Image: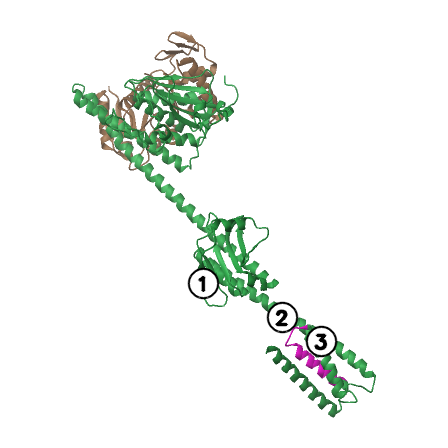
Amino acid sequence: MSVKILIVEDDKQIRGFIGYALSNERYETMEAGSGGEALRRMEEDRPDIMILDMGLPDMDGMEVIRKVREHSLLPILVVSARDREKEKVAALDQGADDYLTKPFSTTELLARVRVAARHLDQQLTDRSEPTLTVRDLRIDSDKRLTYLSGREIHLTPMEYQLLHFMMQNAGKVLTSGAIINELWGAGYGNDTQALRTLMAGLRRKIEKNPGKPEYIVTEIGVGYRLKEG
Amino acid sequence: MERFRKLLVTAAIFAAASLIGYGFSIAGFPDASIALVYLLAVLFAVRQTSSLLTGLITSLAATFCFNYFFAEPRFTLTVNDPNYYVTFLVMTVTALAVSTLTARVRRDAQTAREREQEAKALYTLTNLLSDAPNMETIEEIAAGAVSEGLQCGAGCLGFDASGNPEQTYIYKPYGRERSLIRREPEEKEELLFRLNHLREDHYEGEEFYDWPMFSEDKILGVIRIQRADMEKMDPSQIRMLHAMLDSISLAMDRFRTAEQRIQSREEASRERYRANLLRSISHDIRTPLTGIIGTSEMLTARLADEPDARQMAEHIRKDAAWLHSLVENILTLTRLQDQGLSVAMETEVVEEIVGGAVARVAELHPDHEIEVELPEELLMAPMDAKLIEQVIINLLENAIKHSPPNGPVLVTVAAGAADWLRPGAGDPQDAGGQGAASLRDMVMISVCDEGTGIREKDLPHIFELFYSVEHHNRSRQRSYGLGLTICETIIRAHQGLIAARNREGAQGAEFAFALSQQKGEEIQ
């Protein structure tokens, strides 16, 4: 059974080419031009993934996310012409899974959709895999060991936790807030300084050149993403 | 004339008193009642004047009249009974006391009347001033009120918000109704110098006195009064002048403050409107750009078998991408200007920002190799990460644009800024060495390409808005313009340094910027 994707976007042309690009990749697509229609489609057609434009004619994208999250965990990929980092973080914190700023390349869009589809599979299977692999990076979570191209690398416990969390969410953007929450707990607040330093240390161990990262890329003002491909 | 009239009235009063006294003496009333009639006469006489001398003279006159007309022997100044001397003395002293008291009452009444007039004049002035719709009206009212209230010729010169005198001042000569004269003040520098070096609260010139009015050290205006008029003024008039100056300067200050408030409100709303407009334009451009870029990508993929058509589709995508970067730059510039060039800085890991920018550019230009050289130590610098990312992206885009196809671009991060970044470096007059310590405390990011470099005559203008360099080998000419200008604006807002030069010992150009480094705790 193919993955069903709901495209919520009021601009017909954009809806058209996204639909075309996705059907080329053998996804099943359906379209909605407004928030109300999107919510109706959600109930009637039960899509697996939602691509959501934030600027809809009838309601704000944030409201759509909130309403969908009341009863569904489907991956939501936001595409928006709003480029303020605050707005991206707000959408992600509201429950969106990923974010693309318009204009975006089709390659980028397809990559994000693939990530969402893969996480869909993971939701069905066991999430606590003993080994996580992203390209040449491998984590053995039973033994708490990390390998890069087959060679073991030594990480501090915090670095290990950070990498483990990022690998669990490979391909997805993680907000600094979400990472801090995971590593230090909810009471830690939003002190990104410690995270930046920790991240710099981790990168020096896994990246050939931290100035040209191949694994963990920074989405400035939003958070970090572990690249899959 | 007035004096003569008063003298006549006094004489008449005394004549009447003497007649009544004569009647009393025929009726056989005692001398004391006649003396009392004379005292009454003194009282009436001094009511006309507040002068003490008049009081003394009338007192003596009353005594003499009594002596001459009624003391035996009558119609002589001699007396038979020496007891009369006592009567004369008591009478004179009483008359004197009565006249003095009366004169004082009169004087007090006079002062009270004057005060009341002053208060009334000031009240009217304040009232008029509070309704004044503009500075010129304030000046007209001020000149008129001073001229009328102090019976002199008076001028008023206003100063604008930046402390410069206006082109003309308003002069009101005394007496003539409503004849305001506009005059040109003397040299501005001279006037300002004089007013800025005052030792007293006013300036005494050869022809006139200048009374400046201030509000918190800022000059609002000057009241100018003829020297001759000024010298005639009594203390009560000077007091009146001060009170008027106070209320005029208050009115001017109030007007200036209101004017400034309106101006800044208008400016803010204009700014907001402009920013909103640009933002919504940028937003509205993004949506169709998404369609163009996405669709042309799909087309490129579908036209794999038709090289010509494929290339056309590819061109559409590239142009759209270029348009997009232009929109982004306009947005950034708008935001920067919105915030008055102030940036919200946070301490960032420099290599992280460089990495983020390089990753984004590499995605768009897969055929150009971007090398990144980092130092061993982890460098931190306070910055607005999003803006600095944009600077690096712009510099990289610029380097790629001026590189030969597939030409490599090198990004270097280093502790300490190179000397050539220093403003004025390369100037023959430059002594060098100055600010070396602050250069050492910076972190420098430089972008080098292997292109044709920058012509010497273009170098000084390279960061200017829309300065464009001609390309002989390119049919489509694009300005360096906005991208580099924005880099310069962003770096300036960060109090950093930015410069461009041709590489030494290699082909190509080098653009570099430096930011103050965060010297903090050790980083593990």
| Residue B133 appearing in the image | yes
Residue at 64% across, 80% down? B7
Residue B256, placed above or below residue B63 = above
Question: Could you give the CA–CA distance between mark 2 and mark 3, rounded to whole angstroms?
Answer: 21 Å
Q: Amino acid at mark 3?
A: Leu
Marks 3 and 2: in contact by CB < 8 Å?
no
Marks 3 and 1: in contact by CB < 8 Å?
no
**The quadrant where residue A213 appears:** top left
Q: Is residue B111 magenta?
A: no
Work out whether residue A68 or residue B509 is closer to the camera in this orientation and state it.
Answer: B509
- Which chain shows up in green? B
Question: Could you give the CA–CA distance between mark 2 and mark 1, rounded to whole angstroms?
Answer: 35 Å
Q: Considering only order in the chain, which callout, 3 or 2, is on the residue closer to the N terminus? A: 3
Q: Considering only order in the chain, which callout, 3 or 1, is on the residue closer to the N terminus? A: 3
Percent across and percent down for residue B154 are: 51, 61
Q: Disc 2 is attached to a residue of which chain?
A: B
Instruction: Identify the residue position indicated by label 2 in the image.
Output: B109
User: Which disc is residue B180 wearing?
Assistant: 1
Q: Amino acid at mark 1?
A: Leu
Percent across and percent down for residue B253 are: 50, 52
Mark 1: few/some/many CA within 10 Å (<14, 14-19, 20+): some
Q: Secondary structure at mark 2?
A: helix
